[in-house]
Amino acid sequence: MAVAPAALHWHEEVDIGIAGAGGCGLAAAHAAADGKLRIAVWEKSEAAGGNTALSCGMIAAAGTAQQRAAGVFDVGEDFARDILTRNGGCSDAALTRRLCEGSASLLEWIGDRCGIVLELIPTMCDPGHTRLRLHAPAARSGRPLVQALLRSLDRRGISLHPATPVLQLWTDAAGTVLGVQVKRPRKAPSNVRCHKLILATGGFGANSAALAQHCRAAEGLRYAGHPGSSGEALVWGTDAGAATRHLDAYDAHASVAVGSNLLIPWIMIMAGGLLVNQRGERFADESCGPAAMVPRVLAQPGRVAYEIFDGRISRAVAAADARFANEVVPRVVRRADDIEGLARQFQIDPSALAQTVAAYNAAVAGGDDPFGRTAFGGPLSTPFYGIRIAPALLETQGGLVIDPSARVLRADGTIVPNLYAGGGTAVGLSAPGGNGYLLGNGLLCALGWGKIAGEQAAHELLTARAGGDPVPPTPATEGEGGPGALT
């Protein structure tokens, strides 16, 4: 580990340092800010946002006011059960419950802190959710979330340093974190003393060497996430003695437009779209979900597929997702007045695709679907639309082991003093491999652990300075308060 030499010169000092200005880091900064602490956020990219800005802005949450208004009864316990069912019980039960049972209050906090309205998406976008629980801004993008968090940084006394990568983490000989070394533009590296440090730099999806070492199953996938997710914090944490878990877990999506990193909303399938291969043939029950479809698409000729839909579906998705209407349609959607014309645009045999669509419409009308699909949404009719898609890696899901207060842990269960982690840097809610992820859990982990880490770090500092016991109480569960709770 990077042990600070005895003669190390500290060029400056902050109370809480945060590496990474994506959703996790920005949430941590807001949660820690109370006017009494010096907080610095370092971001190696030119702009803040990370994977949060690239996302569809969907946050999974249970027991929200938005759900109640829509007549949806849901509780955190049921949400946690869905996650543990999807990942086969592989995610830590205490961490899973902590996020799920605090998810509704997290959404309230985001609304109060940022003044942004999150809507309940009125379509079941992932069969693993037994309730409607995906919430997002009206634009169906993470950019409004990032912009709202950024707008209020200055007035809360938080300093943001873009294009300023953290180079290394300094500890003492016992492994207590002391600070970091950062590199500001056009300046020599400087050492910053941090009383508490929060790692929020994302996963390692952009690092091919790290994928080859830890996550071989995702190694051959095109990467569609933020290029800054290159895994430095994983190295810093393990060098400081941190344990890791599920480094072979990842989130991949079957439907990313070829030639771009545009994620095609899965509600396209749920509304009645279908997938065909280069031969114009269906090859699976499309409604199985975006992660489950990844290996099925990869098994097709050229490792690509074509999403076929009609005007009814296009209008429904555009009405629900402004990003689809403004970005996806102009850039990657093809249109034709008949299915044969659409087939020719994709160099698919016209008669084969026409037969496939006719068989699909027959199944919609009440016939047996050979792939077992039961949810169709209606028959397809002219005009027809299509998108060439291929699977892509969105983000790794394994990382540093944390406790329910977002404190980084060693293999023996003891904490790494002064170190916290969240988002893609920490272990997620998935299982080894690519099938354990539920839609909306990425931003739940980013914003949820960011908030917990910021509150916990601030609590420990302020309590210690007041002469109290900095050891936190038992982590809060649903309906309870306490430092680090999502309340």
Image (cartoon, helix red, strand yellow):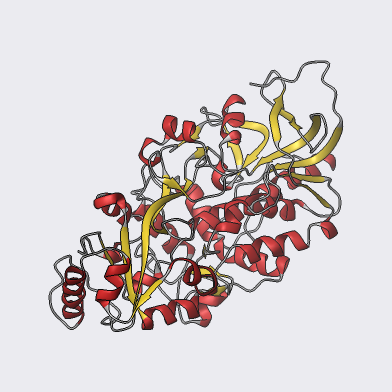
Q: Residue 244: where, in percent of width, then height?
A: 50, 33
Query: What number of labels is visible?
Result: 0
In this view, 125 is above or below 473: below
Q: Is residue 308 left or right of residue 54?
A: left
Q: Is residue 122 left or right of residue 103?
A: left
Which quadrant would residue 485 be assigned to in this image?
Answer: bottom right
Closer-to-camera residue (76/157): 157
Task: Name the residue rendered at 64%, 68% in the picture.
Answer: 108
Q: Residue 97: where, in percent of width, then height?
A: 49, 54
Task: Name the residue rendered at 26%, 53% in the picture.
Answer: 296
Whether residue 375 is visible, yes or no, is no
Q: Residue 143: where, in percent of width, then height?
A: 63, 63
Assign the N terminus to one quadrant of the image: top right
Closer-to-camera residue (153/178): 153
Whether residue 144 is visible, yes or no, is yes
Q: Is residue 197 left or right of residue 291?
A: right
Q: Residue 167: where, in percent of width, then height?
A: 69, 31
In this view, 60 is above or below 220: below
In this view, 471 is above or below 329: above
Q: Is residue 463 left or right of residue 443?
A: right
Assign the C terminus to one quadrant of the image: bottom right
